[in-house]
């Protein structure tokens, strides 16, 4: 058998023995190719003016992902080298030279990487179509399947993969060329060792790490870049200190409590913890750090998405909206342009008035967080104008009972205002509070329909009230184009030239396009990074676990002879899996959940509501994280259970 044939045979066996690793490398190639194709896609880049930064954002995320996958390949390659040390040492024993064995190992992994790259590129073409469809859906454009390969994307993917494998295999090749027979045969006995030998040092390190973890989590939520960096450093020290002290302490805990060690199946669990956790402190800390970054990336992506949607939803309720301060300034340029270029089906020009006191505002402030930017008194809207605005926005018709006034507010103010019972006196008219309505009505800015709320009163009740600003809202036959929006903005600059002031101009189409752009710029790269991190960390954990298949098989075969039932063995295996996969996931949850909640509460009230509320974002982030994690756990458990548990008698 030639060296090439032996390499090919070993490559096939390697792919079979480390199937989870092989599948992950295929997915890595697919992700790299699909996002590279997205970067080079002219169609995606020309969807919106805000998308010019998309290639740069994806490129930056890709650099990080290449480093992450590079670490995965380097770790897996080294791990497989140590596991196969006896085999490689035997090759030296039968007469092969070190350089031949090094080349054999190099060719094997090159074959595995080449196959993974080929399969990943094909799969990446399909993934690209999925990402392309998602991007087009964001911009509400039709999607048509058109399968094809991007040569620049393929070239960049090959370069990235080549760099990853070259660096990983170069270290392995150098090790094999310098190793002797003894080093290779006993390579699988190399491990970290128990890092902390004495119980006193272990307890001190454990206590200090807990303090660092709490301090780091708190500092991470301080609105200061320097404090956040210090907090991140504290969290890294916490993770390494925690896992080094905890993993070293588990064997000591059971050694001092023999009664617990021999209770039920605890002895088997103890042996697993002794063999794994006591020698995996640094690895567990690294994986836990990756999981923390994953959870924070997912949560941050959802927060950004909710922020973009929440802010745009209120502003985009009208096809065209103009908020105009200083009514004496001539704005005929706006309306001349609108009449000539924008087909308007329905419109209204109206005023926002002010009461003589901020009674409702003070009431709201005493019950919920509230920002009254640009409004020092309660804002008021005439009933006829309100009815016209509801019609333009497409909302159902409502009634204003005689002697009453209505509230229209953002959803977070609904409950406080439903409990409001004070009458409103405007001149000689006294009105009682009536219904509360919460549809979007452009209530989140300065020259808008109130800041979070507005009082709707009969037309005659506004006589004598001061005007805060004028406004214009319109329903158009077709969406207002970006060109029309740009031209109106240019006219606004002309009207306010040299003053430093401006009117508020918004269109539904422009707001939706901005949300799509911002989502593509921020959310896509964050989830790209999160998926890559989760796959990498879960793969390394799974490789470590599946590498013990032969030892587990011998262990359970012996236990069967001693009389243990298959059900008890399965229960023991599940317990081992639960401990092994749960430990590195606990600190990320304890760190990530408070940080995501803090981030989701940071925007102004009324933005993060509904599906974007902080609680929903946390739950969704955890579900996405554990869903991907569970796939690896189920694959590993199913494989190990099938291969190590004896058949039922």
Image (spheres, grey):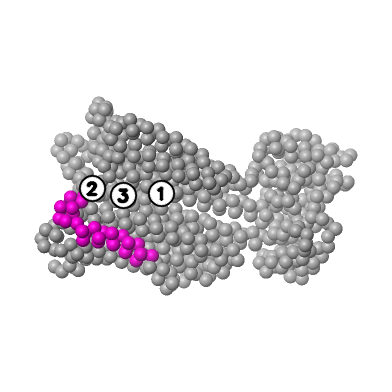
Q: Secondary structure at mark 2?
A: loop
The vertical placement of 95 against 575, above or below, is below
Q: Residue furthest left?
A: 94
| Viewer-side residue, 509 vs 210 | 210
Mark 2 surroundings within 10 Å by alpha-carbon count, few (fewer than 14), some (14 through 19), many (20 or more) = few
Q: Horizontal and vertical percent for residue 443? A: 70, 49
Q: Horizontal and vertical percent for residue 208? A: 41, 35
**Magenta span contains residue 166:** yes
Q: State the residue position of label 2.
A: 190
Q: Secondary structure at mark 1?
A: helix
Task: Name the image quarter holding the N terminus.
Answer: bottom left
The residue drawn where x is 38% and y is 60% is 28
**Which residues lie in the magenta part?**
160-188
Q: Which mark is residue 542?
A: 3
Q: Quadrant of residue 355?
A: top right
Count of numbered circles on the image: 3
Q: Which mark is residue 290?
A: 1
**Magenta span contains residue 393:** no
């Amino acid at each position: 058998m030639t060296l090439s044939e032996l390499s090919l045979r070993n490559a096939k066996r390697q792919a079979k023995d480390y199937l989870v690793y092989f599948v992950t490398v295929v997915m890595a190639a697919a992700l790299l190719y699909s996002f590279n194709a997205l970067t080079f896609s002219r169609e995606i880049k020309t969807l919106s003016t805000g998308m010019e930064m998309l290639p740069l954002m994806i490129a930056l995320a890709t650099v990080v992902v290449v480093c992450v996958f590079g670490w995965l390949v380097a770790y897996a390659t080294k791990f497989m080298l140590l596991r196969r040390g006896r085999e490689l040492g035997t090759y030296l024993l039968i007469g092969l030279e070190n350089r031949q064995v090094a080349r054999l190992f190099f060719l094997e992994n090159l074959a595995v990487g080449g196959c993974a790259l080929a399969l990943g590129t094909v799969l990446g073409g399909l993934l690209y179509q999925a990402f392309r469809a998602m991007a087009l859906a964001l911009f509400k454009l039709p999607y048509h399947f058109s399968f094809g390969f991007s040569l620049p994307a393929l070239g960049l993917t090959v370069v990235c993969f080549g760099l990853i494998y070259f660096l990983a295999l170069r270290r392995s090749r150098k090790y094999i060329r310098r190793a002797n027979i003894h080093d290779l045969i006993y390579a699988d006995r190399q491990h970290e060792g128990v890092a902390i030998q004495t119980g006193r040092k272990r307890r001190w390190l454990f206590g200090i790490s807990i303090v660092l973890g709490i301090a780091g989590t708190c500092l991470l939520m301080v609105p200061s870049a320097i404090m956040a960096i210090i907090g991140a450093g504290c969290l890294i020290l916490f993770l390494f200190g925690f896992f080094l002290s905890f993993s070293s302490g588990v064997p000591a805990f059971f050694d001092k409590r023999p009664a617990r060690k021999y209770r039920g199946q605890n002895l088997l669990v103890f042996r697993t913890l002794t063999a794994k956790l006591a020698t995996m402190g640094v690895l567990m800390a690294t994986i836990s750090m990756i999981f923390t970054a994953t959870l924070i990336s997912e949560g941050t992506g959802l927060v950004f998405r909710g922020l973009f949607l929440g802010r745009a939803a209120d502003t985009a309720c009208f096809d065209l909206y103009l908020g105009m301060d200083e009514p004496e300034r001539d704005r005929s340029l706006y309306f001349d342009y609108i009449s000539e270029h924008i087909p308007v089906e329905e419109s209204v020009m109206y005023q926002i008035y002010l009461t003589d006191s901020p009674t409702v505002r003070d009431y709201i402030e005493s019950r919920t967080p509230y920002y009254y930017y640009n409004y020092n008194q309660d804002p008021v809207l005439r009933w006829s104008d309100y009815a016209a605005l509801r019609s333009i926005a497409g909302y159902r018709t409502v009634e204003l009972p005689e002697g009453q006034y209505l509230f229209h507010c953002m959803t977070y103010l609904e409950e406080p205002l439903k409990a409001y019972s004070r009458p409103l006196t405007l001149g000689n008219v006294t009105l009682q509070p009536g219904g509360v309505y919460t549809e979007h009505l452009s209530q989140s800015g300065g020259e808008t329909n109130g800041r979070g709320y507005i009082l709707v009163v009969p037309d005659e009740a506004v006589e004598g009230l001061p005007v805060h600003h004028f406004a214009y809202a319109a329903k158009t036959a077709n969406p207002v184009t970006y060109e029309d929006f740009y031209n109106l903005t240019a006219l606004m600059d002309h009207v306010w030239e040299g003053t430093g002031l401006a009117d508020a101009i918004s269109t539904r189409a422009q707001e939706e396009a901005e949300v799509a752009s911002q989502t593509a710029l921020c959310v896509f790269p964050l989830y790209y990074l999160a998926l890559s991190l989760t796959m990498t960390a879960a793969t390394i954990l799974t490789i470590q676990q599946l590498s013990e298949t032969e030892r587990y098989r011998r262990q359970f075969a012996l236990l069967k002879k001693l009389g243990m039932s298959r059900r008890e063995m399965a229960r023991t295996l599940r317990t081992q899996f639960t401990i092994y996969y749960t430990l590195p996931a606990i600190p990320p949850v304890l760190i990530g959940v408070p940080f995501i909640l803090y981030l989701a509460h940071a925007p102004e009230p009324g933005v993060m509501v509904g599906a974007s509320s902080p609680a929903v974002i946390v739950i969704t982030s955890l579900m996405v994280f554990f869903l991907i994690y569970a796939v690896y756990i189920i694959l590993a458990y199913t494989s190990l259970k099938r291969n190590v548990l004896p058949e039922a008698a």
